[in-house]
Image (tube, rainbow, N blue to C red):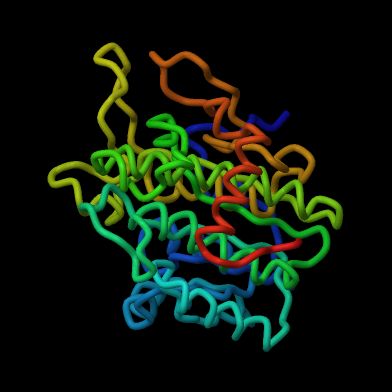
Amino acid sequence: MPQPFGFNSTTEDVLEGVDLKGKRILITGASAGLGIETARALASRGADLVCAARDLEKARRALAETFEQAADGVQIELIELDLASLASVRKAADALNAKGETFDVVIANAGVMACPEGTTSDGFETQFGTNHLGHFVFVNRIAPLIKDGGRVVIVSSGAHHRGDVDLDDPNFDKTPYEPYLAYGRSKTANTLYGVALDSRLRGRGVRVVSLSPGLVPTELGRHRAGAPAGASPAPAPSVPPLLPKTLQQGAATSVWAAVVAASDLIGGQYCEDVQVAPINTDLATRGGVRPYAIDPTRAEALWRKSEEMVGERFDL
């Protein structure tokens, strides 16, 4: 009997024997780190890709190996997408809608982490605006392009343990800014968005899942000198440190959720280590998902607040 996937599973492990020829997958943040490995793994199995990135030249350089390892006949398209600008988000979504080509999977992978205090071009706190609101508008706008029975994969983080979203103060206008708290709230928002979007799309068989890739040393952690990406202060001295993963291990949960796992298993769920994560209410331990991050009532409240903030309503 095959062994279940887990912490050490890689993209190659979860895609063994999988043929993705004829599948079309969109990946945001496909210019570095997990986005590149996700793209490489899927293209090597025959999937056509649309790779979205803020810096297209950087993405072309980073994707060079992906082009080389792609299966015969695979098409890889690059589109410009700056999630910190709703003008860019809407322009990219409008261009995709105008083309009308459908997707089997959308992977919302891009993000920023523990940034110095700042705002997006629209005045939102940088991490909430980029990680959540940018994807909220982009994915909602292209939702009609996702095929019935398709999937949306949202890369969240175990950093959601840092705190629930503050719907009364999403931009830290009333409270002191703390980079890791802001990051954690944005990742909670990612997970709650997955719950709300799944409830809207499941009627046509489209399921939505959020996940933690684990601690993976990538340029995401550029704002924390001397520490790898994903590293955040331990919630308590007694909590053991996170163990790092390779890129191949970190992207494994994304590709598993995208094309391997059963839809009904992962729909509306939060996953980690290539499996559905358990609910964890113990503040002294890592792992699992906090109840507030998958609460349907909180998810709906965030949806309404997000619509208010971006000035756009989505009836999906």
Query: Residue 116 in the image: x percent, y percent?
Result: 20, 52
Query: Residue 258 in the image: x percent, y percent?
Result: 65, 54
Instruction: In the rendered view, tell whether residue 233 sits above or below residue 309.
Output: above
Query: Residue 1 in the image: x percent, y percent?
Result: 73, 28
Relative to the observer, which residue lies in front, 183 or 275? 183
Side of 155 relative to 150 (left or right): left
Instruction: In the rendered view, tell whether residue 53 sits above or below residue 289.
Output: below
Query: Residue 38 in the image: x percent, y percent?
Result: 50, 59
Choose top left, top right, bottom left or bottom right for residue 152.
bottom right
Question: In this rendering, does residue 250 appear at all?
Answer: yes
Instruction: In the rendered view, tell whether residue 70 sits above or below residue 231.
Output: below
Question: In this rendering, does residue 68 appear at all?
Answer: no
Residue at image x 41%, y 32%? Answer: 163
Residue at image x 42%, y 39%? Answer: 214
Instruction: In the rendered view, tell whether residue 252 sits above or below residue 78.
Output: above
User: Which image quarter holds the C terminus?
Assistant: bottom right
Residue at image x 32%, y 77%? Answer: 58
Query: Total of numbered circles in the picture?
Result: 0
Q: Residue furthest left?
A: 226
